[in-house]
Image (tube, helix red, strand yellow):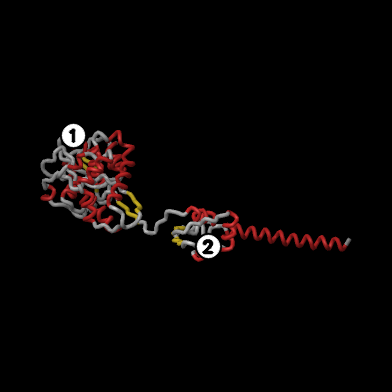
Amino acid sequence: MAVKKKLFLIIGIILSIILIFVLGMFVFFKTSLKAVDKNNKTPIEVVIPSGSTTTKIATILKEKDLIRNEFVFKLYLKIKKANSLKATTYQMNKTMNVEKIVNMLEKGNSYNPEQIKITFKEGQRITDYAEEIGTKTNRTPDEVLSIINNKDNINAFIDKYWFLTPDILNENIYYPLEGYLAPETYYFKNKDVEVLDIVNTMLKETAKNLEKYRSNIENNIPYYMIMSSIVELEGTNTKNRKMIVGVFENRLNNSMNLGSDVTTYYALQKPMTSDLTTEEFNTPNPYNTRGPGMIGKLPVGPICNFSLSSLEASVNPTKNDYYFFVADKNGEVYYSKTNKEHEQMVAEIKEKGDWIW
């Protein structure tokens, strides 16, 4: 009996060791399948050459510190029968576990290391956009402007997009597409991207943005595009932009000049970095609402490419009984009913040292 007990004890110990080993291997296997660093999303470029074996792929991934164990990675491939791994360039990160990595390798991907990103900011002019394109692509700013202003291209755009009307062909308009290019961050294949591809991409984004307001604006698109571009530069948020549109409507409806300084800057194609002179304000120009002959008129065209905040303000302005407004250097807007009140407010702002210049 003692011999049998001893034998059972030995068998039990052996089975326990085997069980512990199996459990340990299972834990090791599961742990090895986890992400290397679940908090590190830094992009890592991984190139899998054509003809790479699973061993080669495992080595590449281990060298990039994207997997914990090469053997476990290869074992996982056999268990999942993942035999068709695509040779290409990938963008991975350390938050990806083995399952996600293998799924990506099986599918291949559209990651393109030559891809470029171009950010077009709200409130900027087409000339600013041309400079940005010139910086990020193999196109020069002059080439960009030439293509954008080409009449054949403009007519093709008018035929394609409902919000582009023949009004933009007015000979007094500097850049027909000014105000119609949606500010956004865009991605393109590489630096050789065609200018027309960039413009079409932006116009498609504009079409998407305007669709919500289509029933409100399609009967007078130029008005809303022009007004939106002005309040983009005059206001700082949707609330004060709505108030400013209300002020502008009061002035237009009462046979007054719009009197917007930002239109003068655009008319003269000057940056808004310093104050203007009396002579400049009085310059006759179909963009300059401070100049002569502009009573009750908007500029001939938009003066910048605007945000949805400004469009919302133009479509749904806040009705008020003000005729003047002024903003200080902190973006605070003050409203007045008379020119006397307005001038007094300007004087107070200057006295406090809060004048914008």
When the figure is inspected, residue 112 is found, relative to residue 150, above or below; the finding is below
- The image position of residue 283, as x and y in percent, is 11, 48
Q: Earlier along the polypeptide chain: callout 2 or callout 1?
A: 2
Contact (Cβ within 8 Å) of mark 2 with mark 1: no
- The image position of residue 246, as x and y in percent, is 24, 37
- For the residue carrying disc 1, how many other residues have a C-alpha within 10 Å: few (<14), some (14-19), or many (20+)? few
Q: Residue at x 49, y 57 (%)?
A: 39
Label 2 amino acid?
Thr
Label 2 residue SS:
loop
On the rendered structure, is 189 left or right of 30? left
- The image position of residue 224, as x and y in percent, is 25, 39
Q: Quadrant of residue 287?
A: top left
Kindly identify which numbered label has been placed on residue 253.
1
Which residue matches tag 2?
Answer: 53
Q: State the residue in front, 139 or 119.
A: 139
Q: Quadrant of residue 247?
A: top left
- For the residue carrying disc 2, how many other residues have a C-alpha within 10 Å: few (<14), some (14-19), or many (20+)? few
Q: Residue furthest right?
A: 1
Q: State the residue in front, 249 or 88.
A: 88
- The image position of residue 317, as x and y in percent, is 27, 37
Q: Which image quadrant: the C terminus?
A: bottom left
**Viewer can see residue 106:** yes
On the rendered structure, is 266 left or right of 122? left
